[in-house]
Amino acid sequence: MSQFSEWQPIATFSDLPSAELARGRLEAAGIDSQIDHRGSVGIFGAGFSGTTGRGFALLVQTGDVEASRVALDLPEKRAT
């Protein structure tokens, strides 16, 4: 178990299979993650795990954000 306690979204996917693939890449890199499924009823109903209007947020612990961006080949987060 990691020492970090806060979870932060690092990416949002329009469908569950894409989110699961990204989660698998993080797992292979040794990074704990979870997918936020709240409000994720698919556009074709509750039994459909495809595209949603809200999307699926991929969450990682605060201390793993940079390593996760590297593992997923995401661009650097710009300061606002």
Image (tube, helix red, strand yellow):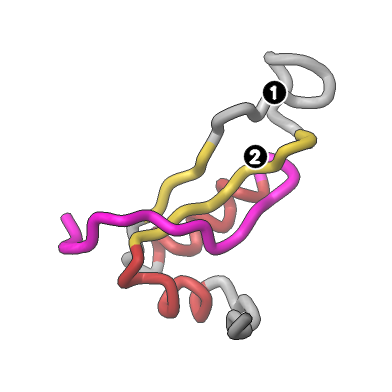
Which residue lies at the image location 69% right of the left edge and 15% below the top edge? Answer: 46
Separation (CA) of disc 1 from disc 2: 11 Å
- Horizontal arrangement in the rendering, residue 31 relative to residue 16 (left or right): left
Badge 2: few (under 14), some or many (20 or more) residues near its Cα, within 10 Å? many
Which residue lies at the image location 46% right of the left edge and 54% below the top edge? Answer: 59
Which of the two residues, 18 or 36, is positioned nearer the viewer here? 36
Indicate the quadrant containing the N terminus: top left, top right, bottom left or bottom right: bottom left
**Residue 4 included in the magenta stretch of the image:** yes
The amino acid on which the numbered mark 1 sits, given as a three-letter code, is Val
Furthest residue toward front = 80
Q: Position of residue 23 (x, y in %)?
A: 50, 54
Q: Position of residue 69 (x, y in %)?
A: 52, 75
Q: Position of residue 30 (x, y in %)?
A: 32, 66
Label drawn at residue 16: 2
Residue behind mark 1: 41
The stretch of residues the image draws in magenta is: 1-17
In the rendered image of this protein, does residue 75 appear above or below residue 64?
A: below
Furthest residue toward right = 44
The amino acid on which the numbered mark 2 sits, given as a three-letter code, is Leu
Quarter of the figure with residue 62 = bottom left
Which residue lies at the image location 70% right of the left edge and 42% below the top edge? Answer: 55
- Horizontal arrangement in the rendering, residue 57 relative to residue 64 (left or right): right
Badge 1: few (under 14), some or many (20 or more) residues near its Cα, within 10 Å? some
Indicate the quadrant containing the C terminus: top left, top right, bottom left or bottom right: bottom right
- Horizontal arrangement in the rendering, residue 44 relative to residue 33 (left or right): right
Label drawn at residue 24: none
